[in-house]
Amino acid sequence: MTKPIIPPHDPVDTAALDAQVRERREAEERERQAARVAAQASNSFETAVVLRAAAASQARRAQDQGVDAFRQQQEVERRQREGQQRMEEEAAAAAEQAANLASPWLNEAPELGVSALAPHRVRPDHFKAFAPHQTAAIHATQAEQVEAKRAAAQCAAAEQAAYEAQAAAAAAEVERRAAAAEDARRRQAGELAAVQQRQAAQARQREAQLAALLNSQQPTPAYFAQWGTSHR
């Protein structure tokens, strides 16, 4: 508020001035009080916001700590399970290996290969190898098969050679016949050309004779004497 201006010629009204001063001071006091109330409200709101943010941050930290603890517990349990499983697998593998090493079937115990029917018989479920005479028979059969295959290959080669020779002879005969036909065609063409030339010469000779005959004939006096007669 501004200070009132009093004209110099008017008498001073002290009571009015005091009232104005009091009103101005009261208004300023009200404004200051309102400003303090607003500042307190703003501070209270900011404090509440800060407190809420701090509480939320603390809650998040507590939640993160709980999640981390849960994950660590899960990791510990997983490692324990994997360790237990690995120990069980190693124990099972060791037991299986020991059983295999002690197994008479895998160790090929001789007593398991003895036939109940006769000692010279071979058990199909315990077959180890052929007998010497069986091996010799197999080798002989293989040699016979090799020889038969070689003979078949030689026979096939001979048949192929004979076929190729026959095909070559047939091709040569075809070429010979084609050459003979070409020679005959050429001879016929030569004979035809000679006949045509002879015919052309004869035609020229006949034309020359006819032309000579026609050009040499002259009318006789009897021809001219016929003019003016009755039979004309």
Image (cartoon, helix red, strand yellow):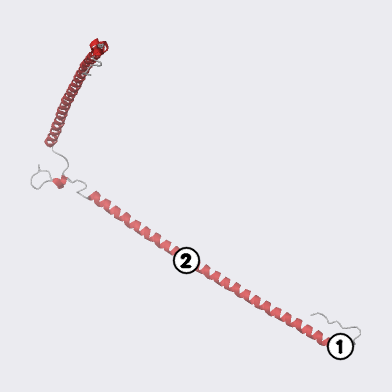
Q: Marks 1 and 2: in contact by CB < 8 Å?
A: no
Residue 53 appears in view: yes
Q: Residue at x 16, y 45 (%)?
A: 126
Are there few (<14), some (14-19), or many (20+) residues within 10 Å of tag 1?
few
- Check disc 1 and report its element: helix, strand or loop: helix
Marker count (numbered): 2
Disc 2 is placed on an element classified as helix
Q: Hey, which residue is sitting farthest left in the picture? A: 117
Q: Residues within 10 Å of mark 2 (few under 14, many from 20)?
A: few
Q: Which residue is mark 2?
A: 67
Q: Quadrant of residue 149?
A: top left
Q: Give percent across and percent down for residue 7.
A: 89, 83
Amino acid type of the residue tagged 2 in the rendering? Val
Give the residue type that dot 1 points to: Thr
In the picture, the quarter occupied by the C terminus is: top left
Q: Nearer the viewer, residue 66 or 95?
A: 66
Describe residue 2's horizontal placement relative to residue 38 as left or right.
Answer: right
> Which one is closest to the eye, mark 2 or mark 1?
1
Q: Position of residue 82 (x, y in %)?
A: 37, 58
62 on left or right of 129: right
Q: Which residue is mark 1?
A: 14
Image location (x, y in percent) of residue 13: 87, 88
Residue in front for this viewpoint, 157 or 136 = 157
Q: Is residue 205 visible?
A: no
| Residues at marks 2 and 1, CA–CA distance in whole angstroms | 78 Å
Task: Work out whether 223 lies above or below 4.
Answer: above
**Residue in the foreground of this view, choosing between 191 and 87:** 191
